Amino acid sequence: MKIRYFDNAATTPVREEVVKEMLPFFGVEYGNASVMYSLGRNAKKAMKRARERVARAINADINEIYFTSCGSESDNLAIKGFAYENKSKGNHIITSKIEHHAVLDSCKTLEKQGFKVTYLNVDDKGKINLEELVNSITNQTILMTIMFANNEIGTIEPIEEIAKIAKKKNIVFHTDAVQAIGNVKIDVKQMNIDMLSLSGHKFYAPKGVGALYVKNGINFKKLQDGGEQEYNKRAGTENVAEIVGLGKAIELIYNDYDEYNKKLITLRNHYIDRVKNEISNCKVNGDLINRLPGNANVSFKNVNGSELLFELDKYGICASAGSACSTSNPAPSHVLTAIGLDKNYIGGTLRVSFGRDNTMEDVDFLVNRLKEFVNKK
């Protein structure tokens, strides 16, 4: 049975070119990047090249890139690390109600330690209100952390406007850009972004490697003790092979940016048009204009989402009910709840996220199977 994969927001397959560049660092180039002899120097050189590639992709300086294990670690390091280092300047943080749990749970942890957190509302498309953001600022506000694009409904936030507000008020701005990398052109200098999180497995690099951009001059505390790797900000022996893969993948995804995203938009629009025209009682969630090119989040009235996923799986179709990080949680999606989606629709939500291997034939096959299941209800 052919597998038709529509869950690229959860993870992507590693590209062949990425694997090829990684392979030597599992074998002949196995050196520890912290040692002085040639094997170690080769590893260090490979890491430097990867750091340059990441920096170039977002227009950062090479010494502003810190390698981590994933987007969640990057979020934790940015939010907690900055808060702990700068608590003498203030104890107030602003975020939104639809952030990834890596952000929300980091903020909850800080609340237990005496920090104050404002969780901004969003409208029915998933966008924050800039006026509410401004009104939430106090003389104790030290950090704003708002995601670049939502992992469930695909809505892209007004990042440049948010960053301008933060800069004007002398507040540091962090964005979780895990879903945006490769799907949005990002210039951290032009956009006034102070800190940014990313994760390799969202753009055809391996799982288990990510990065954090921190603008020069912004101080943050390391969260784990040990060695002095990553400019003494992230202790632990570097995962050289996967760091190499991350660098190669981010270079490739932006080299192919226009063609890649044009394809995703074409597939997404075809899918949404067919679903809206051929299946009754459905609702497309998120902003239809300012959204990730490969994201289509649709809710079907009075449909059991788990039953739908199992039915699609019988045909080799891989999709999601929401974030892969929270599929074991039976509670309704915090994102769909925040946008005020009717409870009769929330349970029947299907997130489809397209990737470079999908075809129009795959999309039509998916819609036809959806019609068969939903129309029986």
Image (cartoon, rainbow, N blue to C red):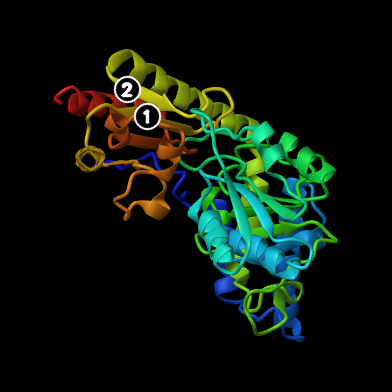
Going by the numbered disc 2, the residue's amino acid type is: Cys
Eyeballing the image, is 339 above or below 146?
Answer: above
Left or right: residue 289 compared with residue 3 = right
Residue 158 on image: x %, y %? 67, 33
Residue located beneath label 1 in the image = 298
Question: What numbered label is drawn on residue 282?
Answer: 2
Name which residue lies at 30% across and 30% down: 345
In this view of the protein, can residue 244 be seen by the observer?
no
Left or right: residue 101 compared with residue 146 = left
Name which residue lies at 29% across and 15% down: 278
| Depth order, front residue of 126/87 | 87
Which quadrant holds residue 63? bottom right
Residue 101 on image: x %, y %? 49, 54
Left or right: residue 347 compared with residue 314 = right
Name which residue lies at 28% across and 41% down: 2
Going by the numbered disc 1, the residue's amino acid type is: Val
Using the numbered discs, state the Cα–Cα distance from disc 2 to disc 1 in whole angstroms. 7 Å
Eyeballing the image, is 112 above or below 252?
Answer: below
> Quadrant location of the C terminus?
top left
Circle 2 crowding by C-alpha within 10 Å: few under 14, some 14–19, many from 20? many
Residue lying farthest to the top in this orientation: 277
Q: Are marks 2 and 1 in contact (CB under 8 Å)?
A: yes
Q: In terms of secondary structure, where does tag 2 sit? A: strand
In this view of the protein, can residue 202 be seen by the observer?
yes
